[in-house]
């Protein structure tokens, strides 16, 4: 009987910890204006796109909620599609002319930063705040 109780408790602990679902809130602030929309991608640690979302901008802020994630490492990249052409516009030298950013607020000098620098770990419900680079 004690052994069965122990196995039952162990099973319950595994289910609660192994299958816990986490909510991630991503708030992008300091957006230059309310024109257009924010285009966002969430990646897992293997660089697989988990979701692509389009967010509205209100009062220079856009908020995304991603539900039912497992504990682990994730990464975000996004851009401010001011003219709503669904692509990040660049100048003749390839420099973005619309706001953009990555999780951990990392930047690159002449190219996107290495993916490993975008990664952040979540173990429970988490909120991150990001600011685009213009």
Image (tube, rainbow, N blue to C red):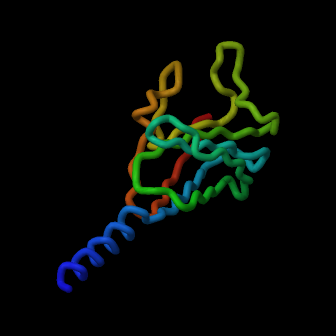
Residue 127, percent across and down?
49, 59
Residue at (18, 84) in percent of width and height: 2
In the rendered image, which quarter is residue 11 located in? bottom left
Residue at (53, 48) in percent of width and height: 130
Residue at (68, 48) in percent of width and height: 53
Q: Residue furthest bottom?
A: 1
Residue 77 sits above or below residue 126 on the image: above
Residue 6, percent across and down?
22, 78
Residue 46, percent across and down?
46, 36
Residue 45 sits above or below residue 72 on the image: above
Residue 90 sits above or below residue 42 on the image: above
Q: Is residue 5 left or right of residue 71?
A: left
Rendered-image quadrant of the N terminus: bottom left
Q: Residue furthest top?
A: 93
Residue 15, percent across and down?
38, 68
Rendered-image quadrant of the C terminus: top right
Q: Is residue 96 left or right of residue 73?
A: right
């Amino acid at each position: 009987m004690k052994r069965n109780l122990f196995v039952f408790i162990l099973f319950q602990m595994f289910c609660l910890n192994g299958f816990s679902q986490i909510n991630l809130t991503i708030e992008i602030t300091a957006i230059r204006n309310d024109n257009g929309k924010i285009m966002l991608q969430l990646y897992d640690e293997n660089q697989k796109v988990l979701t692509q979302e389009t967010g509205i901008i209100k009062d220079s802020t856009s908020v995304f909620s991603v539900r039912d994630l497992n504990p682990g490492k994730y990464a975000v990249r996004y851009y401010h599609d001011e003219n709503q052409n669904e692509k990040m516009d660049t100048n003749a030298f390839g420099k973005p002319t619309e706001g953009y950013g990555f999780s951990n607020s990392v930047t690159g000098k002449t190219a996107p930063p290495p993916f490993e620098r975008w990664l952040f770990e979540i173990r429970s419900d988490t909120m991150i705040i990001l600011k685009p680079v213009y």
